[in-house]
Amino acid sequence: MTMLVFLLEEPSAREMLQATLPRLLPETAFQCIVFKGKQDLEKQLLPKLRGWLTPDSRFIVLRDQDSGDCVRIKAHLRSLCQQAGRHDVLIRIACRELESFYLGDLTAVEKGLGLTGLARHQNTARFRDPDHLANPALELATLTRERYQKVLGSRAIAPHLALDTNRSVSFNALITGIRSLHP
Protein backbone atom coordinates (compact mmCIF):
# COMPACT_ATOMS: atom_id res chain seq x y z
CA MET A 1 0.00 0.00 0.00
CA THR A 2 1.29 3.43 -0.92
CA MET A 3 1.93 5.83 1.95
CA LEU A 4 1.66 9.57 1.28
CA VAL A 5 4.21 11.52 3.31
CA PHE A 6 3.64 15.25 3.67
CA LEU A 7 6.56 17.48 4.59
CA LEU A 8 5.07 20.68 5.98
CA GLU A 9 6.35 23.97 7.31
CA GLU A 10 3.65 24.49 9.93
CA PRO A 11 1.13 22.69 12.16
CA SER A 12 -1.87 24.43 10.56
CA ALA A 13 -1.10 22.64 7.28
CA ARG A 14 -1.22 19.30 9.11
CA GLU A 15 -4.64 20.21 10.55
CA MET A 16 -5.91 21.08 7.08
CA LEU A 17 -4.63 17.82 5.58
CA GLN A 18 -5.90 15.62 8.41
CA ALA A 19 -9.42 16.88 7.74
CA THR A 20 -9.16 16.96 3.95
CA LEU A 21 -7.33 13.77 2.99
CA PRO A 22 -9.84 11.24 4.38
CA ARG A 23 -12.50 12.87 2.20
CA LEU A 24 -10.22 13.08 -0.81
CA LEU A 25 -8.66 9.61 -0.64
CA PRO A 26 -10.52 7.62 2.03
CA GLU A 27 -8.48 4.41 1.75
CA THR A 28 -5.03 6.03 1.61
CA ALA A 29 -2.54 5.99 4.46
CA PHE A 30 -0.70 9.23 5.07
CA GLN A 31 1.73 10.80 7.48
CA CYS A 32 2.45 14.48 8.15
CA ILE A 33 5.89 15.63 9.21
CA VAL A 34 5.79 19.18 10.50
CA PHE A 35 8.88 21.35 10.64
CA LYS A 36 9.46 24.56 12.57
CA GLY A 37 8.97 26.95 9.68
CA LYS A 38 10.19 27.11 6.11
CA GLN A 39 13.89 27.43 6.99
CA ASP A 40 13.71 24.30 9.14
CA LEU A 41 11.85 22.47 6.36
CA GLU A 42 14.51 23.36 3.82
CA LYS A 43 17.35 22.55 6.22
CA GLN A 44 16.00 19.10 7.11
CA LEU A 45 14.43 18.12 3.78
CA LEU A 46 17.58 16.52 2.31
CA PRO A 47 18.45 14.32 5.32
CA LYS A 48 14.79 13.40 5.90
CA LEU A 49 14.34 12.21 2.30
CA ARG A 50 17.71 10.41 2.24
CA GLY A 51 17.01 8.61 5.48
CA TRP A 52 13.44 7.54 4.73
CA LEU A 53 13.18 3.75 4.92
CA THR A 54 9.47 3.00 4.49
CA PRO A 55 8.92 1.44 1.06
CA ASP A 56 6.15 2.59 -1.28
CA SER A 57 6.20 6.14 0.09
CA ARG A 58 5.27 9.11 -2.06
CA PHE A 59 6.38 12.53 -0.85
CA ILE A 60 4.57 15.86 -1.00
CA VAL A 61 6.23 19.08 0.13
CA LEU A 62 3.88 21.94 0.98
CA ARG A 63 5.29 25.35 1.73
CA ASP A 64 3.96 28.90 1.83
CA GLN A 65 5.17 31.33 -0.82
CA ASP A 66 5.03 34.29 1.56
CA SER A 67 6.82 37.15 -0.21
CA GLY A 68 9.20 34.94 -2.20
CA ASP A 69 9.27 34.09 -5.89
CA CYS A 70 7.16 30.97 -6.38
CA VAL A 71 9.25 29.64 -9.29
CA ARG A 72 12.52 30.07 -7.40
CA ILE A 73 11.14 28.49 -4.23
CA LYS A 74 9.87 25.47 -6.13
CA ALA A 75 13.15 25.10 -8.05
CA HIS A 76 15.13 25.24 -4.80
CA LEU A 77 12.93 22.62 -3.16
CA ARG A 78 13.14 20.42 -6.27
CA SER A 79 16.94 20.71 -6.20
CA LEU A 80 17.03 19.57 -2.56
CA CYS A 81 14.79 16.61 -3.37
CA GLN A 82 16.94 15.61 -6.32
CA GLN A 83 20.10 15.84 -4.22
CA ALA A 84 18.44 13.32 -1.91
CA GLY A 85 17.86 11.02 -4.89
CA ARG A 86 14.13 11.67 -4.96
CA HIS A 87 13.02 12.82 -8.40
CA ASP A 88 9.31 12.19 -7.99
CA VAL A 89 8.47 14.46 -5.05
CA LEU A 90 5.33 16.52 -5.51
CA ILE A 91 6.05 20.13 -4.54
CA ARG A 92 3.21 22.54 -3.93
CA ILE A 93 3.40 26.18 -2.92
CA ALA A 94 0.50 27.86 -1.12
CA CYS A 95 0.20 31.26 -2.81
CA ARG A 96 0.91 33.40 -0.55
CA GLU A 97 -0.13 31.51 2.56
CA LEU A 98 -2.22 28.54 3.59
CA GLU A 99 -5.01 30.95 4.51
CA SER A 100 -5.57 31.54 0.79
CA PHE A 101 -7.08 28.05 0.75
CA TYR A 102 -9.69 29.16 3.30
CA LEU A 103 -10.35 32.49 1.61
CA GLY A 104 -11.09 30.45 -1.52
CA ASP A 105 -14.08 28.89 0.24
CA LEU A 106 -15.76 31.41 2.50
CA THR A 107 -18.73 29.08 3.00
CA ALA A 108 -16.34 26.68 4.75
CA VAL A 109 -15.03 29.54 6.89
CA GLU A 110 -18.60 30.40 7.90
CA LYS A 111 -19.42 26.81 8.82
CA GLY A 112 -16.14 26.12 10.57
CA LEU A 113 -16.08 29.25 12.68
CA GLY A 114 -19.83 29.50 13.22
CA LEU A 115 -20.13 32.86 11.47
CA THR A 116 -22.69 34.23 9.03
CA GLY A 117 -22.49 36.60 6.10
CA LEU A 118 -18.99 35.74 4.90
CA ALA A 119 -19.89 33.65 1.85
CA ARG A 120 -21.52 36.66 0.17
CA HIS A 121 -18.01 38.15 -0.17
CA GLN A 122 -16.72 35.24 -2.28
CA ASN A 123 -17.51 36.82 -5.64
CA THR A 124 -16.24 40.29 -4.76
CA ALA A 125 -13.05 41.37 -6.49
CA ARG A 126 -11.09 41.00 -3.24
CA PHE A 127 -11.89 37.32 -2.66
CA ARG A 128 -12.51 36.07 -6.20
CA ASP A 129 -8.82 35.13 -6.54
CA PRO A 130 -7.44 34.77 -3.00
CA ASP A 131 -3.98 33.66 -4.15
CA HIS A 132 -3.24 37.25 -5.15
CA LEU A 133 -3.86 38.74 -1.71
CA ALA A 134 -0.66 40.09 -0.14
CA ASN A 135 -1.43 38.86 3.39
CA PRO A 136 -4.14 36.18 3.46
CA ALA A 137 -3.71 35.46 7.18
CA LEU A 138 -4.38 39.11 8.02
CA GLU A 139 -7.30 39.22 5.57
CA LEU A 140 -8.83 36.14 7.16
CA ALA A 141 -8.34 37.45 10.69
CA THR A 142 -9.93 40.77 9.73
CA LEU A 143 -12.83 39.14 7.87
CA THR A 144 -13.60 36.87 10.83
CA ARG A 145 -13.14 39.64 13.42
CA GLU A 146 -10.15 37.78 14.89
CA ARG A 147 -12.04 34.48 15.28
CA TYR A 148 -9.54 32.79 13.01
CA GLN A 149 -6.36 31.49 14.63
CA LYS A 150 -3.92 29.39 12.62
CA VAL A 151 -4.11 25.90 14.15
CA LEU A 152 -7.58 25.99 15.68
CA GLY A 153 -8.98 27.76 12.65
CA SER A 154 -7.48 25.19 10.29
CA ARG A 155 -8.92 22.40 12.40
CA ALA A 156 -12.38 24.02 12.32
CA ILE A 157 -12.51 25.13 8.67
CA ALA A 158 -10.80 22.26 6.82
CA PRO A 159 -13.58 19.66 7.30
CA HIS A 160 -15.90 21.99 5.37
CA LEU A 161 -13.60 22.85 2.45
CA ALA A 162 -15.12 22.03 -0.91
CA LEU A 163 -12.61 19.90 -2.77
CA ASP A 164 -13.74 20.82 -6.27
CA THR A 165 -14.99 24.42 -6.15
CA ASN A 166 -12.37 26.30 -4.15
CA ARG A 167 -11.39 29.70 -5.61
CA SER A 168 -7.72 29.25 -4.63
CA VAL A 169 -5.72 28.05 -7.62
CA SER A 170 -2.92 26.81 -5.33
CA PHE A 171 -5.41 24.75 -3.27
CA ASN A 172 -6.75 23.20 -6.48
CA ALA A 173 -3.19 22.44 -7.64
CA LEU A 174 -2.53 20.66 -4.32
CA ILE A 175 -5.73 18.60 -4.59
CA THR A 176 -5.06 17.69 -8.23
CA GLY A 177 -1.48 16.74 -7.40
CA ILE A 178 -2.51 14.52 -4.50
CA ARG A 179 -5.11 12.79 -6.66
CA SER A 180 -2.45 12.14 -9.31
CA LEU A 181 -0.30 10.24 -6.79
CA HIS A 182 -2.99 7.72 -6.03
CA PRO A 183 -3.74 5.01 -8.59
Image (spheres, grey):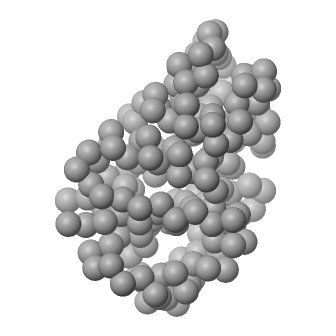
Q: Quadrant of residue 30?
A: bottom left
On the image, the x and y values in percent for residue 157 come to: 54, 31
Q: In which quarter of the image is residue 109?
A: top right
On the image, the x and y values in percent for residue 4 come to: 36, 63
Q: In the picture, which quadrant includes the N terminus?
A: bottom left
On the image, the x and y values in percent for residue 54 come to: 33, 79
68 vs 1, left or right, is: right
- Residue 47 position (above or below residue 105): below
Q: Considering depth in this image, is 34 or 175 the residue closer to the camera? A: 34
162 vs 35, left or right, is: left
- Whether residue 40 is visible here, answered yes or no, is yes
Q: Quadrant of residue 74?
A: bottom right
**Residue at 28% across, 47% down:** 25
- Residue 25 position (above or below residue 6): above
Farthest-out residue, top? 117
178 vs 132, left or right, is: left
Q: In the picture, which quadrant includes the C terminus?
A: bottom left
**Residue at 40% across, 36% down:** 163
Farthest-out residue, front? 152
**Residue at 78% across, 26% down:** 146
- Residue 92 position (above or below residue 88): above
- For the image shown, how many numbered marks are present on the structure? 0
**Residue at 70% across, 63% down:** 37
On the image, the x and y values in percent for residue 99 come to: 65, 40
- Whether residue 100 is visible here, answered yes or no, is no
